[in-house]
Amino acid sequence: MDMRRNPVTFRRFHGKRGLTIILALFAGGADLCVAENLQTLVNRLFQGKVGAAIVSDPHTGRILALWNPEIAFKQAYTPGSTAKLVASAAALEEYRISPSETIMCRRVPRLLGEPFHCSHPPVAQPYDLATALANSCNYFFSELSTRLSSPTLAHWYAAFGFAAGGEDGSPGEVQISDKPREKALATLGEQGVTATPAQVLSAYSAIASGGRVYHLILPGQRKAPSLEREVPLRKSTLDILTTGLRACVEEGSCHAAAVPGVSVAGKTGTAPALDGSRVTHAWFVGFAPADAPEVALVVFLKRGTGGNDAAPLAAKILKQCFALRKPTP
């Protein structure tokens, strides 16, 4: 049984290239994902792609579907705009910005220049933090970086589990310079920070579970859920972050991850490859339903963009997750 006293059964399947897949099938709670069918879908969606995906229950850490554990747990990449969650939480918790304070987007961040111009449509009204997160406004977050010291930003990256290491020796690093430009890039997740898909998922799971992060449990592992850490966030901070992430999917830069009848909260990221090439990697990470999360997921693809490549895959996975759920009014 799991921690909710739901029966658990295990099935073993043999995939291509000698891979063995073990599925944990739950009789309650997160079973709405119909784990066997979900894993089949994930396998099909990722055929021919280089990347990783994890679908989990944020309240237990149990993995419901997994693609490419080597990349998911052992390889670290620049997180791109998914990291804006951390700067948002840091600024709110450290009282560096109020929820109602606004900043007018000037399109081109003064610290970073034209290469980091905002990709969202031009706006006539200034953004508050939630709407800046929803629209992934580079100008807003570059300005926000001037209010956060390097040690403060590094502290909050650590609090969310970036470069956490751990028993499995997970890679990833957080090295934030005091120089204004480099600090702004770290705030945008473009430089000075790398993380595995599993670490990025855990950061967003903290929002889904009210600040509690559970150790991820691989399919087939007969482990009881165990708390990994707690991220010290006020309820007001959790509410603002969730509002921004939900708006990101409903009307912002993550709209391709929307699922009819399900409120999804999440964030895309398009991040530069570490080899100095012009290749970008694609991210989507989030949870659903936004107001009462049952599922968290991360999708990572080598080569692509978050909005065009990772978010549509996430939508297909979430649609399967809630296939047996009646649409919300």
Image (spheres, rainbow, N blue to C red):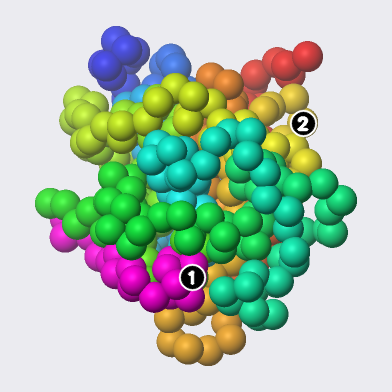
Seen from the viewer's position, the closer of residues 141 and 83 is 141
The kind of secondary structure element at disc 2 is: loop
- Indicate the quadrant containing the N terminus: top left, top right, bottom left or bottom right: top left
Q: Amino acid at mark 2?
A: Pro
Residue 146 in the image: x percent, y percent?
A: 48, 61
On the image, which quarter does residue 239 sit in? top right
Q: Position of residue 211 (x, y in %)?
A: 35, 30
Depth check, mark 2 against mark 1: the one in front is: 1
Question: Residue at (41%, 45%) from the top-left corner?
Answer: 90
The residue type indicated by label 1 comes to Leu
Residue 123 position (above or below residue 190): above
Q: Which is more toward the observer, 182 or 157?
A: 182
Q: Residue at x 48, y 29 (%)?
A: 238
Mark 1 is surrounded, within 10 Å at the Cα level, by few (under 14), some (14 to 19) or many (20 or more) other residues, namely many
N-terminal-most mark, 2 or 1: 1
Q: Nearer the viewer, residue 263 or 301?
A: 263
Question: Residue 185, labelled with which disc?
Answer: 1
Which disc is residue 79 wearing?
A: none
Q: Is residue 216 left or right of residue 184?
A: left
| Residue 121 picture quarter | bottom right
SS assignment at label 1: helix
Horizontally, residue 139 falls left or right of residue 95, namely right
Residue at screen point 52% across, 42% down: 97
Q: Residue furthest top?
A: 5
For marks 2 and 1, give the CA distance.
35 Å
Q: Residues within 10 Å of mark 2 (few under 14, many from 20)?
A: few
Residue 194 at least partly seen: no
Residue at the spot 16% in from the left edge and 52% down from the top edge? 166
From which residue to which does the magenta span run?
A: 168-186
User: In the displayed image of the protein, which residue is found farthest to the left?
Assistant: 167
Which residue is under mark 2? 260
